[in-house]
Image (spheres, rainbow, N blue to C red):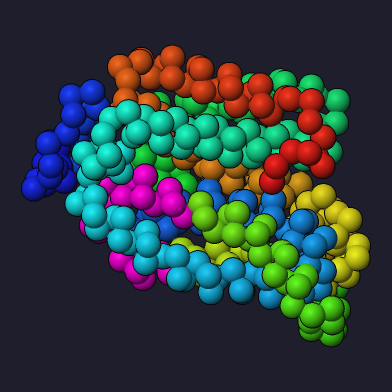
Amino acid sequence: MYNSHIFENTIAIPNSLRVVLINKSDTITPIQLILLSMTAIGLKNHVFAISPLVEVSGRDAWLAVLFTLLLVLLWIPLLLYIQNQTNRQPLLVWLSSIIGSVPTKIITITFICYLILMSSISLRETTIWTNIAYLPTTPPIILAIVFLGACCLMVKANLRALNMLNVFLLFFIVILGFFVAITNIQHKNFYLLLPVLENGYKPAFDGMIYQASGMTELFVFLLLQHKVNVPLRFRHFFAAALILTLLTIGPLIGAIIEFGPTEASLQRFPPFEQWTLVSIGRFIEHLDFLSIYQWLAGVFIRLCLLLLLIKDLLILNTKININWILFFTSTAIVILTLSPITDFQFPL
């Protein structure tokens, strides 16, 4: 059975761009999409963006996060306008009917390159952290191939299967997040957040770009909107933006009030350094191994979602077998991940 209503009242679509009807078994609800973004996009905000935020904005980094939320609320209506114009069609199918197949293919290639870059950054950060935290002698190429191979196996399923796995993994990610936050209350000094705006507004404004780099990933809602069983509303985008903001501001403030802005700015992964402080009583400590689950579960869902988007974009425009799509995409991601670029040159 297919969602035939998705393509009702639409303009004729060029033959050069094949239409793929969406199977009802591959649809999700807006709440499930928000939960997917909480894991996939949340990893970027919760982990990758914290270090540069503190480095650039210091103790006022949390203000940069709030300022970014205000700008995102002004950007959401544009996303809603685009979604309404598509009439529930896949975004690129709609674009093809408006601007033609050739410009659409150029945009498709741009999207795919961007998604591959996002995937390679996530995988690179994962291999670096894995080498630092618990597998210091394992070659990065082995880590990259094994982890990406597991993601490719998951991507052969559909979006609904990924969503079901995400709900299960996210439940324990959230539990562990509250656990580390509550357990470390004994180490928190909220006076380290003062004075506010000691150096004016500029540091806070300078840090907004790092938070915005994660928030703008909400554009993937447009790439998935035709797989959501009802049209997305402002409240859905707002809920996702608010959750992503809280996912950033929680570990960000935690890093500042537990380590101080100077020490936190020197740390590569501040949210996971907070796990080293966890202790229960006098005899239970060294619980930072639990952070391995948090990171790997989050990056697994993120990579799977990005690969799923790449697969769907290519299937719309080519007749290439899905196995070849995953092979060439994974090869490109691994090559970028292992490229000899230092962390100072590699984009975040």
Residue 16: tell me if it is visible: yes
The quarter of the picture where residue 186 lies is bottom right
Magenta span? 218-239
Q: Residue at x 53, y 37 (%)?
A: 114
Q: Is residue 309 left or right of residue 71?
A: left
> Where in the figure is residue 133, as x and y percent of width and height?
82, 41
Q: Residue at x 54, y 52 (%)?
A: 41
The quadrant of the image that shows the N terminus is top left
> Where in the figure is residue 200, as x and y percent of width and height?
79, 80
> Where in the figure is residue 237, as x and y percent of width and height?
40, 64
Q: Is residue 47 left or right of residue 132?
A: left
> Please, what is the dominant secondary structure of the magenta stretch?
helix
Q: Residue at x 63, y 33 (%)?
A: 120
Q: Nearer the viewer, residue 206 or 229?
A: 206
Q: Nearer the viewer, residue 5 or 209?
A: 209
Q: How many marks?
A: 0
The answer to if 228 sits in the magenta stretch is: yes
Query: Eyeballing the image, is 296 above or below 225?
Result: above
The quarter of the picture where residue 93 lies is top left
Residue 175: tell me if it is visible: no
Q: Residue at x 66, y 26 (%)?
A: 336
